[in-house]
Amino acid sequence: MSWGLRLLGVGWPALALLVLWQTWIAAAHVSPVIAPSPAAVAVELVTHPMRYAQATVATAAVAAAGLTIGMGVAIAAAAGAWLTPVGDVVLTLPALLVQSTPIVALLPVLARLLGYGEPTVVASAAAITFLPTFVLVGAGLRRTPPGAAELFGVLGASRWQRLTLLALPSAVPNVLTALRIAAANSVLAALVAEYLMGQTGLGNMLADAQSQLLTAQAWSASLVATVVSVAAFAAARSVERSKHYDD
């Protein structure tokens, strides 16, 4: 199959959406204050490329930091829960409470602790990332190859040796699955935090544009944020496939 046909197969939903969008704007005579046309959004992006590039880099940076911290803490917590029988019970409930709390309700608490700035945005992305990673890695640690645990027992391996040499390698597929799930969610959490209290990034740009009724800028920022989220998911998916752990 040629690259042109592959590109068409992947991009036809976006093309159809653009056609429907332009048709709706033209047929309903929608005011630019309510919704801009695709052409207006394209002009906005082409006219101010550096503005969106800088905002994209800022959002991607805090999302990546939150993803790294959240997954790192979650993997360490899952390993700790595996090492101690009561660890799973002690750590799961607080993680579930944090995950069940809406991000808009969690942000004021984080802001009180970390201030109104990038640390709070990073912390919000890390909080969203933690529970899925903790649950998936915990399940992976318990899914060792048949007979492997018995073999390590016969060899007299310590609990730590079983964790580092058996359980953690067995959990790698689950770690990559957690990365795929959490990558896009970390971008979403960063956007929400930037929108509500951030000083930079796409979320802050979206908030400023909406407050000034700059619909073309608001929709452009939303479009770029969507692309960043999809790109994060695709990158994590490609890593998973490259390691031959994709289902």
Image (spheres, rainbow, N blue to C red):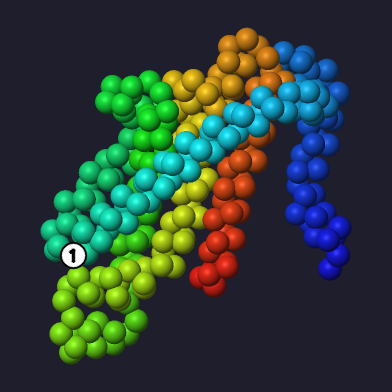
Q: Tell me residue 98's x, y (percent).
A: 30, 39
Q: Secondary structure at mark 1?
A: helix
Asked if residue 247 shows in the view, the reply is: no
Q: Tell me residue 192's x, y (percent).
A: 48, 29
Q: Relative to residue 118, is residue 212 drawn left or right? A: right
Q: Residue at x 83, y 61 (%)?
A: 3
Quadrant housing the C terminus: bottom right
Q: Which residue is mark 1?
A: 83
Q: Tell me residue 185's x, y (percent).
A: 48, 43
Local crowd size for mark 1, using a 10 Å CA cut-off: few (<14), some (14–19), many (≥20): some
Q: Quadrant of residue 87?
A: bottom left
Determine whether 118 is above or below 139 in the image: above
Q: Residue at x 41, y 23 (%)?
A: 117
Q: Residue at x 18, y 89 (%)?
A: 154
Q: Tell me residue 29's x, y (percent).
A: 83, 17
Q: Relative to residue 214, is residue 87 drawn left or right? A: left
Determine whether 245 is above or below 135 in the image: below
Q: Residue at x 50, y 55 (%)?
A: 180
Say which of 99 and 209 sits in front.
209
The type of residue carrying mark 1 is: Leu
Q: Quadrant of residue 160?
A: bottom left
Quadrant housing the N terminus: bottom right
Q: Quadrant of residue 217?
A: top right
Asked if residue 42 shows in the view, the reply is: yes
Determine whether 219 is above or below 181 in the image: above
Q: How many marks?
A: 1
**Residue lying furthest top in this view?**
212
